[in-house]
Amino acid sequence: MTKLTPPQDCSSMEEVRAQIDRMDRELVRMLAARAGYIDRAIALKQLNGWPARIPERVEEVVMNARAAAEGEGLDPDLIESLWRQLVEWSIAREARVIREE
């Protein structure tokens, strides 16, 4: 990721917006990389005969995200909501390939 200008050093809305746009592109890049790991998880789950949804793992992922949010001073309820949506999308993607639907 390219070095960002710290928020307090941004002197105009254009600069703030440019930094947000840069960060958004990086977030999308990271989510695309995460999807690659989901694809690998699909292959490994198929090899092991595991289902797409493993409830304990779902809760572990969500709780890890909440804890990370708390550590960063970010609203953990917001992060939980976003992560649950991300995890559900991932499980649906896995289920389609594993043919559980």
Image (spheres, helix red, strand yellow):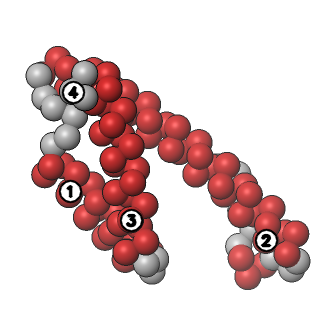
| Residue that numbered label 2 is attached to | 16
Numbered label tally: 4
Residue type at mark 1?
Glu
Q: Nearer the viewer, mark 4 or mark 1?
A: 4
- What is the quadrant of residue 98 in the picture? top left
Q: Classify mark 4: helix, strand or loop.
A: loop
| Residue that numbered label 3 is attached to | 81
Residue 84 coordinates in the image, percent (x, y): 34, 57
CB contact under 8 Å: marks 4 and 2: no
Residue type at mark 4?
Glu
Q: CA distance from mark 4 to mark 2?
A: 45 Å
The residue closer to the viewer here, 57 or 85, is 85
Q: CA distance from mark 2 to mark 3?
A: 26 Å
Drawn side of residue 56 relative to residue 7, left or right:
left
Q: Classify mark 3: helix, strand or loop.
A: helix
Return the disc, 3 or 1, that comes first in the chain's sequence.
1
Residue 85 coordinates in the image, percent (x, y): 39, 54
Determine crowd level at label 3: few under 14, some 14-19, many 20+ residues with C-alpha closer than 10 A. few
At 71% from the left edge and 76% from the top edge, which residue is drawn?
A: 7
CB contact under 8 Å: marks 2 and 1: no
Residue 60 disc label: 1
Q: CA distance from mark 3 to mark 1?
A: 14 Å
64 relative to 50, above or below: below
Return the disc, 4 or 3, that comes first in the chain's sequence.
3
Residue 48 coordinates in the image, percent (x, y): 12, 22
Q: Nearer the viewer, mark 4 or mark 3?
A: 4
Q: CA distance from mark 4 to mark 1?
A: 22 Å
| Residue that numbered label 4 is attached to | 100
Residue 92 coordinates in the image, percent (x, y): 33, 37
Residue type at mark 2?
Val
